[in-house]
Image (cartoon, rainbow, N blue to C red):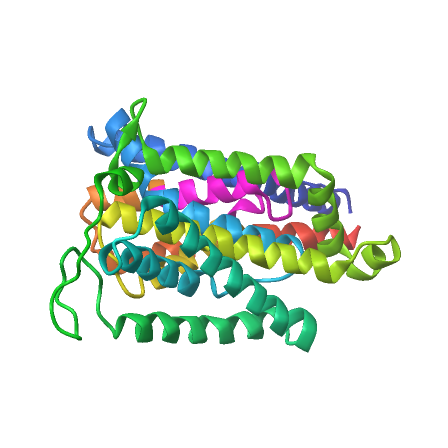
Amino acid sequence: MQAAERKNTMKEKSIQFLFKYGAIALMIFIIIYFSMISDAFFTYGNFADILRSISIVTVLALGVTFTLVVNGFDLSVGSTMSLSTVVTASLMVWYDMPLWLVLILPILVGVLVGVFNTLLIVVIGIPDLLATLSTMYIVAGLHRTYTEGYSIYNHMPLTSGGTAIGEFSNAFLWIGQGKMLGLPVPVWIMLLLVLVAYLVLTHTRWGRILYMTGGNAEAATLSGVNVKKVKFASYVVSGIFASIAGVLFTARVGSGQIDAGAPLLMEAVAAVFVGYSVLGAGKPNAIGTFFGAAVIGILLNGLTILNLPYYAFDIVKGSVLVLALAVTYMHAKNKLSH
């Protein structure tokens, strides 16, 4: 009996350790491993590139984090990012609009997508997953229809005849390609947004209300929380983050590419779920989401240095997600059994 008890105790402690420190331990292991096999890996320039490569995914994932906090799930963020990307590009290239409008109008588009999601979920009562899946297809169709299936670039030929009157300004491209204090500008934007999301979720009354709503909506309602308004706010915030990711993507590549956000959707979702277990949070959180994106980004960077074929990367992303979910749910199962 004592041997069996010791075995169970060891198992519980192992799961507890993996739950709290598994993601960080994996990151340290990856860094040490790739540093040993490649001199190019552990350099300032490479880590700056890794941070730049995860900046857009992290911003996108922060939006998913806010919806998961209220026990929802936004599958439409990838399509919203794509729509924001082509709207941003079109405002500058097709209509030659000033920079402040180019930055504000796509964010308003994200707000509208968030409002539409809330209409489906809160007013009509469609489950979050199905509602945002529907929105994903609708928004994807909208951005393809808007661009007639073409990517947007400087002085492109128009289907109506002639060429586009505008081009991407240097001030706009600096947002995605410039550097400030030795780091790419998108990295600073990402770090700022992670900090804001962290402070809001952990150190404000609204953050506590969000977690309360996600934990038990009925109890939150009885406590005087307007659950519908809270869900509305979280989906609008998700739309805003997706739009910001779209603006960053456009500034980074210097064109408006259709379906730009589609490949990043599952990376963003993986980052959020890997982040559940960072330092034993056990819930969606901004710092965890950043660490989750960083783990995946560092791993993919190392595999690129090893010349692993790009089509194998999804296997790696899926494996990391499975490990994170397995540890999270084993930990939750252990808690329920006690």
Instruction: Tell me if I can see residue 308 in this picture.
Output: yes
Magenta-colored segment: predominant secondary structure: helix
Residue ID at (58%, 47%):
276
Residue at horizontal 64 percent and vertical 48 percent from the top: 283
- The x and y percentages for residue 137 are 43, 75
Q: Which residues are magenta?
A: 274-297
Asked if the stretch drawn in magenta spans residue 259, the answer is: no
Where does residue 325 sit, x and y in percent of width and height? 55, 55
Q: Nearer the viewer, residue 266 or 239?
A: 239
Query: Horizontal placement of 228 versus 88: left or right?
Result: right
Q: Looking at this rendering, what residue extends furthest in the top direction?
A: 181
Residue nearest the viewer, comparing 289 with 249: 249
Residue at image point 34% right, 60% down: 87
Location of residue 227 by image quarter: bottom right
Q: Nearer the viewer, residue 11 or 92?
A: 92
Taking the image as shown, residue 60 lies to the left or right of residue 156, namely right
Left or right for 124, reference 27: right
Against 67, is 200 above or below? above
